[in-house]
């Protein structure tokens, strides 16, 4: 099936959509390899940024990854709707936000029930770091949904893309056992909500709220200041 006319199957809670890919001219026979190459290159750049031993080089890799993702997104010339950048529909946003706050209450309750303290790590996050984390959560959701999910969706279909994109998201949080576990479960939820409601803004808020909740309920001896990659090992 030509990717430019591919319609993703309707599901009970989702509205069927057809997204056109308007990238630079690529022969149909090479479209799938081209999409595979985008996923692999972007993910490798991100991993280099997480695992490079030298800080200066690590920062360069992060910049290269950011530029690559932005350029490849612009090359695809996808619609704002496909990227999830349009304003959210009221019902979809309410569902996503409602589930997230219920989860926060559940996590805090479970910590108290287990005899733990909230906050478990009173030194993090500070108010200054908290608003930065909200911005970072939105950026992560753009990378996860608008870049990786949309390409996985094109390659594997809508439902399978939820699992593939969430798995990539979890791998990026290795070797932290807490964050890898939470991001796999959270990534499945984020990607499913994106698949159904196609908007990253409420998902980004959910991501930030849940991330901050994990930060204040889990001991820093396990979280290592929410670091991943080589930063986690060197904490």
Image (cartoon, helix red, strand yellow):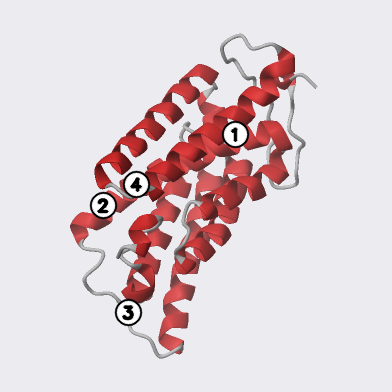
Q: Position of residue 78 (x, y in %)?
A: 54, 22
Q: Distance from label 1 to label 4 (Cα)? A: 20 Å
Q: Position of residue 210 (x, y in %)?
A: 42, 62
Q: Distance from label 3 to label 1 (Cα)? A: 37 Å
Q: Earlier in the sequence, mark 3 or mark 1?
A: 3
Q: Is residue 199 visible?
A: no
Residue corresponding to mark 1: 150
Q: Distance from label 4 to label 3 (Cα)? A: 23 Å
Residue corresponding to mark 3: 118
The N terminus appears in which quarter of the rendering? top right
* Image height of 159 relative to 98, above or below: above
Label 1, residues with CA under 10 Å away: few <14, some 14-19, many ≥20: many
Given the current orientation, which residue lies at the most extreme front position? 53
Badge 1 vs badge 4, beta-carbon distance below 8 Å: no
Q: Nearer the viewer, mark 2 or mark 1?
A: 1
Give SS at disc 2.
Answer: helix
Checking the image for residue 136, the label placed there is 4
Residue 191 or residue 220, whichever sits in front = 220
Checking the image for residue 97, the label placed there is none
């Amino acid at each position: 099936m030509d990717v430019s006319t591919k319609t993703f199957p309707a599901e009970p809670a989702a509205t069927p959509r057809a997204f056109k890919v308007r990238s630079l001219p690529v022969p149909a026979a090479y479209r799938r390899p081209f999409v595979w190459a985008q996923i692999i290159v972007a993910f490798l750049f991100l991993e280099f940024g997480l695992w490079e031993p030298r800080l200066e080089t690590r920062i360069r890799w992060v910049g290269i990854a950011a530029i690559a993702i932005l350029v490849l997104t612009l090359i695809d010339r996808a619609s704002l709707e496909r990227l999830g950048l349009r304003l959210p529909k009221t019902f979809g946003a309410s569902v996503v936000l409602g589930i997230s706050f219920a989860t926060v209450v559940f996590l805090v309750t479970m910590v108290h029930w287990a005899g733990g303290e909230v906050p478990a790590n009173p030194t993090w996050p500070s108010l200054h770091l908290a608003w930065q984390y909200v911005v970072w959560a939105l950026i992560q959701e753009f990378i996860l949904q608008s870049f990786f999910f949309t390409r996985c969706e094109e390659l594997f279909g809508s439902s399978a893309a939820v699992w593939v994109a969430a798995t990539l998201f979890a791998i990026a949080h290795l070797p932290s056992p807490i964050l890898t576990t939470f991001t796999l479960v959270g990534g499945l939820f984020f990607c499913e909500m994106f698949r159904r409601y196609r908007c990253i803004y409420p998902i980004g808020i959910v991501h930030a709220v849940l991330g901050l909740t994990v930060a204040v309920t889990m001991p820093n001896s396990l979280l290592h200041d929410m670091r991943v990659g080589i930063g986690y090992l060197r904490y």
